[in-house]
Amino acid sequence: MSTISGSMLRTALRIGAYAVAATVGFSSVASAAEWKFAIEEGMNDIQGVYATHFKDYVEEHSGGNVSVTIYPYGTLGEGADTTQLAQRGAVQLVNISPGLAGDLIPELQAFLIPYLLPEDPQALETFYRDSASLRNGMGGMYREQGLQLLDVYGEGEVVMTTKKPVRSPADLSDVKFRIMTSPLLISTYQEFGATPTPLPWGEVYSGLQLNMIDGQENPLSFVWSTKIYEVIDYIVFAGHNNFTTSVAANAEFFDGLSESDRALLRDAQAASFAHIMKYQKSLEEESLKQILDTRPSVQVIRLSDEERAPFRAAADAVRDEYVSLTGESGRKFLQSLIADAAAAAVN
Ligand code: 6CS
């Protein structure tokens, strides 16, 4: 067995350290890192596609100094769990959706108010990309929770999937409707006439299968990828919302990044936003086709403007409830979002 003296070992280590420093530069030695990114969905879902693009961009442009590990839904628990992990710094990056984070950041629930966001897809993209109240105004809410807001994007129109036809709030009167866990969704579905039932995502498929719930809402691509279409009979388009999600970083991690790593993160985020918008262009159509090809008995109901009217009217009460839940800060945030949504619709 060969032996190595203390001085030989020290020399070898010094040479090794010089070699590393020469290759990557001293400043990037300090930032060589693994960024852990927890998402609320599977790798082939919209959050997974965004996170994969982000990972590829970071790894390609960091010259091997940063690797990104993605933790899809289930590997670290439900959405509420991954948000906590990001707050504690156990993961550096995380998706946080308003539908799951209402207890943590109540103002975020503005995105759950029906018929608030622009309905035209181009206007909606402009809104997500350019809204100052969203991009800047929301930052403080995240900071209070130890998080740095990075990005916000949509995942498509939210459709109701049910076991019976729904054309009016009266049709929802005997429907136990699964909602995500943010409190404002209780008001929304109460105002829509249903019996709202908050459940974590993991219980939705079996809940529908066992008739413990009779309906749920989600974007079509998610209804397809998670096979929810197997356990419902109707897909109802009421046009009441688009699924919003955000990407956040642990605030301490973000503050501790070198300037170049922060720029890398921002560039990766902008590239991933553009990618996910493009990726979704025909996704809803494709998802619906896949659902109907696979299970032709599923019925599609598109509510007319007249049929949507009572659902639109219900939104007023939800806005009032939002303001009473969030107070003055929520009222101001809501006003600024409405103004930005109107501006996006004009441009
Ligand atoms: O309904 C839910 O709980 C899930 N829906 C989507 C589209 N993403 C994550 C979330 O947990």
Image: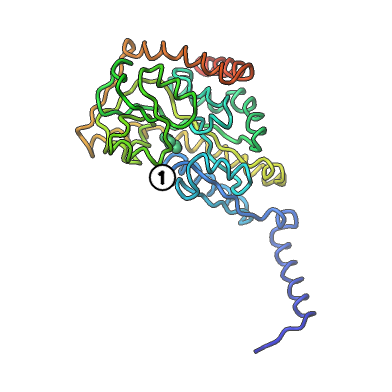
Q: Quadrant of residue 325?
A: top right
Residue at 32% x, 35% y: name it.
287
Q: Which residue type carries mark 1?
A: Asn
Residue 290 visible? The answer is no
Image height of 8 relative to 47, above or below: below
Residue at 59% x, 20% y: name it.
326
Residue 331 lies left or right of residue 222; in this view the side is: right
Residue 131, given in percent of the width and then of the height, sits at 58, 23
Along the line of sight, which residue is nearer the eye, 204 or 332?
A: 204
Residue 72, given in percent of the width and then of the height, sits at 47, 47
Q: Residues within 10 Å of mark 1 (few under 14, many from 20)?
A: few
Residue at 37% x, 34% y: name it.
283
Along the line of sight, which residue is nearer the eye, 168 or 15?
A: 168
Q: Find numbered disc 1 in the image and state the secondary structure of the residue it sits on.
A: loop
Image height of 102 relative to 48, above or below: above
Q: Name the residue beneath numbered marker 1.
A: 44
- Please tell me in which quarter of the rendered image ligand 1 is found: top left
